[in-house]
Amino acid sequence: MPQRQQSHSGVEPAGRKRDRSFGLYFCAGGASELASQIAGVAVAWQVYALTGSVIALGLVGLTQFLPNMALTLFAGHAADIYDRRRVVQICQAVEALTAALLAWGCAAGWLTVGELFAAVAVLGAAEAFKAPAAAAMLSAVAPDGGLQKATTLTTGAFQAAAIAGPALGGLLYTVAPAAPYMVMAALGLLAAILSGAMGSVRSTPVQDGPTVASLIAGVNFVWRSPAILGTISLDLFAVLLGGATTLLPIFARNILHTGPWGLGVLRAAPAIGALVAATALTRWPIERRAGLRMFQAVIVFGLATTVFALSRSIWLSVMALAALGAADMVSMVIRIALVQLATPDAMRGRVGAVNFLFVGASYQLGGVESGLTAALFGTAPAALLGGLGTVAVALLWMRLFPSLKSVERLEQADGAAHGKSLTALGT
């Protein structure tokens, strides 16, 4: 286990050290996410190649999600007790070792479907501990007054990995089944080394052991904070209802009448739109009316989903998906920054764990919801209902959480540096 982080009266790192720490954090996170995206394609392709079963393919995501769900509260507690940098580094090392074993199994010919699923479960458990610890570190390594820009850059890096990773994973798999796992292992090792090079960023208070009260403290904190509850629940319903991308293969084949190349373009469009939005936000950050801008972005997300549902032109559909991705990026940057600013540093791991649990559940349930509504009402009507439902939720949440709508700025003099809540959020 990582060493307990001792509470001490340290001095806030100088600006140059924070810039260096953020650079290492950014590169480590990007390498780790690229490895995950490569693994997603390689594992899915190999499971289907070995089994020929659509059900087995569907179980891959569930196998990764279940350990994540089961360990979430423990993971958040670990992020608030131990050195977060070490937690992230250990998880990245575990991912690299798992990938190395998969590469060995492929090359030696002893890898079975059961072992693939066991590896997926290990990767899911590692992600459960890594995600809240990494998220809790962001405000500590972000340059002073630059939390929004740091959030934009890291989120943009994840979107770039989402574009490059699947393509790279598929290309490597055509070279040799072991090749994507070898690259994944190298990227995981690189991420672990970069995380270790960050040095001590800041200390968190030493907490008690994992009592029931301590484990659910994050849930209680979210429930008592209108800003965080509103932000997380808005994200949950937007993902749950706006899951049109789940139906892309059906849209491509039956509605837009295009082939695999068209499906590839449609899948890439949201990530490309998100990257464009991330680039714009680094140049023109949101400086006022941040809460309202978040709601507006979710509404645009819903409207873009509606246009996509009604479109019968592939290029209009691509533009709608790109707008959807751009709007999601804007709302995501604001949501992440708001949760960081509204949460004390000592609680960020547990609150982040709750957030990731809701996001993961919404993606899993969103796919199910899209499939069921498509089966009941048809593919296009299902996407249309999802888009209109997202708009309705955003409008309703504006009335239910007026303090969230009234948030003016994402940067406060020392909120990011010291974990203070924004008074405007009504926590």
Image (spheres, rainbow, N blue to C red):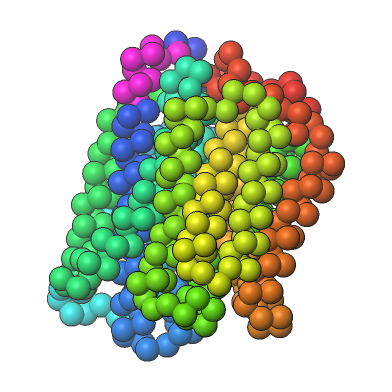
The residue located at (70%, 38%) in the rendering is 228
Q: Position of residue 191 (x, y in %)?
A: 29, 43
Q: Which quadrant would the C terminus be assigned to in this image? A: top right
The residue located at (49%, 84%) in the rendering is 55
Q: Identify whether 329 is placed above or below 39.
A: above
Apparent side of residue 174 relative to residue 34 in the rendered image (left or right): left
Pick the front one: 201 or 287: 287
Q: Residue furthest right?
A: 399
| Membership of 240 in magenta stretch | no
The residue located at (56%, 53%) in the rendering is 324
The residue located at (45%, 39%) in the rendering is 278
Q: Main secondary structure of the magenta part?
A: helix
Q: Identify whether 207 is placed above or below 252.
A: above
Instruction: Say if residue 53 shows up in the picture.
Output: yes
Q: Which residues are magenta?
A: 12-21
Pick the front one: 89 or 144: 144
Apparent side of residue 101 relative to residue 228 in the rendered image (left or right): left
